Amino acid sequence: MPFSTTLRSEHFTFADLREVFAKANEEKSGDALAGLAAHSERERVAAKTVLADVRLGEIVNAPLIDPDRDEVSRLLLDRLDQSAFRSIRSLTVGEFREHLLSDEVSDDELRRLQSGVLPEVAAAAAKLMSNKDLVLAASRFRNVTRCRNTMGQRGVLGIRIQPNHPADDLGGILLAAVDGLLYGCGDAVLGVNPATESVDTAAEILRGLDRLITACGAPTQACCLSHVTTQLACLERGVPVDLLFQSVAGTEAANASFGINLALLKEGRERVLESHRRRDVAWVGDNVMYFETGQGSALSADAHHGVDQLTLEARAYGVARAFRPFLVNSVVGFIGPEYLYDERQIVRAGLEDHFMGKLLGLPMGVDVCYTNHAAADQNSADNLLLLLGLAGCNYFMGVPCADDVMLNYQSTSYHDAVGVRRLLGLRPAPEFARWLEERGIFRDGDLALAEGPPRQRLLGALEAAL
């Protein structure tokens, strides 16, 4: 069904809802690459005007990707809480945006809506919001998860220690991890991206991280970000797997390009939960999955079905939601300038991703990052870092000196974590914060100079882990 509107005597017609969604999106180089972007700012405004008047029920009733041909579409529709959706289905997208920002709607009321929000509805609302709107709306949601510790409460900012090494040298990995712990980082996860995709490498990394956590007593979790099948092969060898990682996307075909499907993710989650029941660990919850996403992944796999990258990113969050993850992370600037060209597009995408994930009930973190061939720098990363801190982001990355020497991209550092926590009055996860105080790494809720006994104890733990 076509949609049309007239702006100052200029008439615009859109063939279907898919085109309205695409052309209402803020400027993204990936949408232009796919031939989906608005041809002018006037056309973009016209598409937004049309989208604002579309009712949420119309979006649910007219799937952008056929559920008979795409298992992600089927999952999203089957999992939609019809009872929660009933209260908003007659709202237009514009009215829904106002509802999310209204002072008259309590945060508790908004939380009760989360299971009734289709990812495409979250994407539609994001397209009508300013950057400030995205920050304000996201800040109203606190999505709490539990594994070895508790993440996501108001006032808590977690940090993933990302001690990658270009040769997967375990000593280098563990030394970088200890450095992060001394800055109060690591409550989200000690998560390593291996340079080599092999069961032996992943097993060595997981065992080393587990020995470090055990030796120092830190209430946190470890993860090796290899393919899900590699991690499950480690599990078969008796290797401890705290969190099961996988990159996910918003279409069946894009997930197939990653070598996964929904059945594999379901099986993996069940196997990790079973292994947790057999381990002598003080688990505080059963959120055991860790997902990463990024705008443009479906397009890079030629699996976007003519849908814009923002909407497909929202659908990836719908996939993640089905598996009750402990962490979800938008690696916002990692794919490159072909999809997010410059700092303006990266900042916008980071705020969109965080808002949509939070609205859908996810424990959203963001890797505030950029590649070295993008039109961005560390100042623009700082801007996004602070905006997301205000928006209530669950966690950021902690990369030594903000420079990942294995993945060759720029992110955020242990020092950045300290700065944002101090500036915004945020603290680590509660169990982890107590451990930091007990070890003398923190004093009265803030980072202490970790010299003397605290440093020596962690260096002793490093020796034990090696």
Image (cartoon, grey):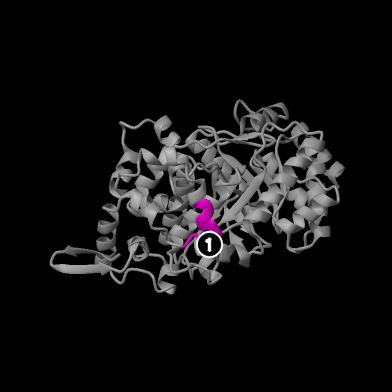
The kind of secondary structure element at disc 1 is: loop
Q: Which residue is mark 1?
A: 70
Q: Is residue 433 above or below residue 28?
A: above
Amino acid type, mark 1 = Asp
Residue 434 image-quadrant placement: top right
Left or right of 253: which side holds 136?
Answer: left
Residue at the spot 44% in from the left edge and 51% down from the top edge: 351
Residue that lies at the very extreme toward the front in this rendered image: 68
Residue at the spot 80% in from the left edge and 55% down from the top edge: 233
Any part of residue 77 in sight: yes
Q: Position of residue 397 (x, y in %)?
A: 60, 49
Q: Position of residue 298 (x, y in %)?
A: 53, 65
Q: Is residue 214 above or below residue 173?
A: above
Residue at the spot 68% in from the left edge and 62% down from the top edge: 406
In depth, the one of 451 and 37 nearer the eye is: 37
Q: Residues within 10 Å of mark 1 (few under 14, many from 20)?
A: some
Q: Magenta segment range? A: 66-76
Left or right of 87: which side holds 436?
Answer: right
Magenta stretch encompasses residue 73: yes
Q: Position of residue 266 (x, y in %)?
A: 66, 50
Q: Position of residue 323 (x, y in %)?
A: 61, 46
| Quarter containing the N terminus | bottom left
